[in-house]
Image (spheres, helix red, strand yellow):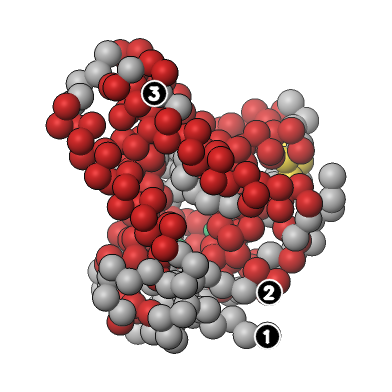
């Protein structure tokens, strides 16, 4: 089945001017420009808000980060664990509230990324389209990947519901702080969304720009400092993740802090997460991880039982 990128800008959309959105992605482009402009205004007028605003912003960003890393990434995209439906949909809501888009498109883009990493079918490779392509531009220029190919398991009413709710959720996400004043508006809305956006974008860009990569090789790398943008919820250990994409655990050593994993362990103890996959290591497999990172076996869509 066809797995090419479906952009209206042609088979090599990274060659189009950055300001040209693919057909159907004008709203995404406008949204990204708008939150950056609003965030810049907020930073100028309200660089230091009260502690309540900071605390509320951090709580929302923390929940959003969990939504994306546990809900979207580890559970839906990689089926590395199975979440209780209430927890799953709670996390989907906060992933969307964080600006991560709908569960099916996130999952499809991500599965194709792993399967076609650093090729012209990888939707966000910096080695193909450059830094800005991998960091942001693909969001409005790549046009998406075939959903029927990459996430037939999410073609269910419970997930289609979220697609329909996306614009409303983003609207609420943007204006959540407005009733509490201008500082709350800017910090809980556009500034939080911009921060969360770039935290995720760095995983696609910098975490795929390993120096000394050989041609055709997976370029994923672990980046400790990126953990600060992710509250050390685990996404910054991206080389680990590419090496063992079906593992629910991203931090492999005691110093590779992974709050996403700690939360999964707690959910498992409470019976709210099952079928949790842990990484297995045999011999020196960690060092040779890049060899098996080329495997796409993990990335074939796995049917998920309906709830
Ligand atoms: Zn990656
Ligand atoms: Zn992944």
Q: Quadrant of residue 109?
A: bottom right
For marks 1 and 3, the one nearer the N-term is 1
For marks 3 and 2, the one nearer the N-term is 2
Q: Which residue is mark 3?
A: 178
| 228 on left or right of 291 | left
Check disc 1 and report its element: helix, strand or loop: loop
In the rendered structure, are the residues bearing label 1 and label 2 in contact, judged by CB atoms less than 8 Å apart? yes
| 2 on left or right of 13 | right
Foreground pick, 190 / 179? 179
Mark number for residue 149?
A: 2
Q: Which residue is mark 1?
A: 1
Image position, residue 194 (x, y; %): 33, 43
Comparing marks 3 and 2, which lies closer to the viewer? 3
Foreground pick, 238 / 77? 77
> Residue at left 74%, top 26%?
270
In the rendered structure, are the residues bearing label 1 and label 3 in contact, judged by CB atoms less than 8 Å apart? no
Q: Is residue 194 visible?
A: yes
Check disc 2 and report its element: helix, strand or loop: helix
Q: Is residue 70 visible?
A: no
> Residue at left 24%, top 44%?
37
| 50 on left or right of 172 | left
Check disc 3 and report its element: helix, strand or loop: helix
> Residue at left 49%, top 67%?
24
Please tell me how crowded label 2 is: few (under 14), some (14-19), or many (20+) other residues with Cα within 10 Å.
some
Image position, residue 13 (x, y; %): 38, 79
For marks 1 and 2, the one nearer the N-term is 1
């Amino acid at each position: 089945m066809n797995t090419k990128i479906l952009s209206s800008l042609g088979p090599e959309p990274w060659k189009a001017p950055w300001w040209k959105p693919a057909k159907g992605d004008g709203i995404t482009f406008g949204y990204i420009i708008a939150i950056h402009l609003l965030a810049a205004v907020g930073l100028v007028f309200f660089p230091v808000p009260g502690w309540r605003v900071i605390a509320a912003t951090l709580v929302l960003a923390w929940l959003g980060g969990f939504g994306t890393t546990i809900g979207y990434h580890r559970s839906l995209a990689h089926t590395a664990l199975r979440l209780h439906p209430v927890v799953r949909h709670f996390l989907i809501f906060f992933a969307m509230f964080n600006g991560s888009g709908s569960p099916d498109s996130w999952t499809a883009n991500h599965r194709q990324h792993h399967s076609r990493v650093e090729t012209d079918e990888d939707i966000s490779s910096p080695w193909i389209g450059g830094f800005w392509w991998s960091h942001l531009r693909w969001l409005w220029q790549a046009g998406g990947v075939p959903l029927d190919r990459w996430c037939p398991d999410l073609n269910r009413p419970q997930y289609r519901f979220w697609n329909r709710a996306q614009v409303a959720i983003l609207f609420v996400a943007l204006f959540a702080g407005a009733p509490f004043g201008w500082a709350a508006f800017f910090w809980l809305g556009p500034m939080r969304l911009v921060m969360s956006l770039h935290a995720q974008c760095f995983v696609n860009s910098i975490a795929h720009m390993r120096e000394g990569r050989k041609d055709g090789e997976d370029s994923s790398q672990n980046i400790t400092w990126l953990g600060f943008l992710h509250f050390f919820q685990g996404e910054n250990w991206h080389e680990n993740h590419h090496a063992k994409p079906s593992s629910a655990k991203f931090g492999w050593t005691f110093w590779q802090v992974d709050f996403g994993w700690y939360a999964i362990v707690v959910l498992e103890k409470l019976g709210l997460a099952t079928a949790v996959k842990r990484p297995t290591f045999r011999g020196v497999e960690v060092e040779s991880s890049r060899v098996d990172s080329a495997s796409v076996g993990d990335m074939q869509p796995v049917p998920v039982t309906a709830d």
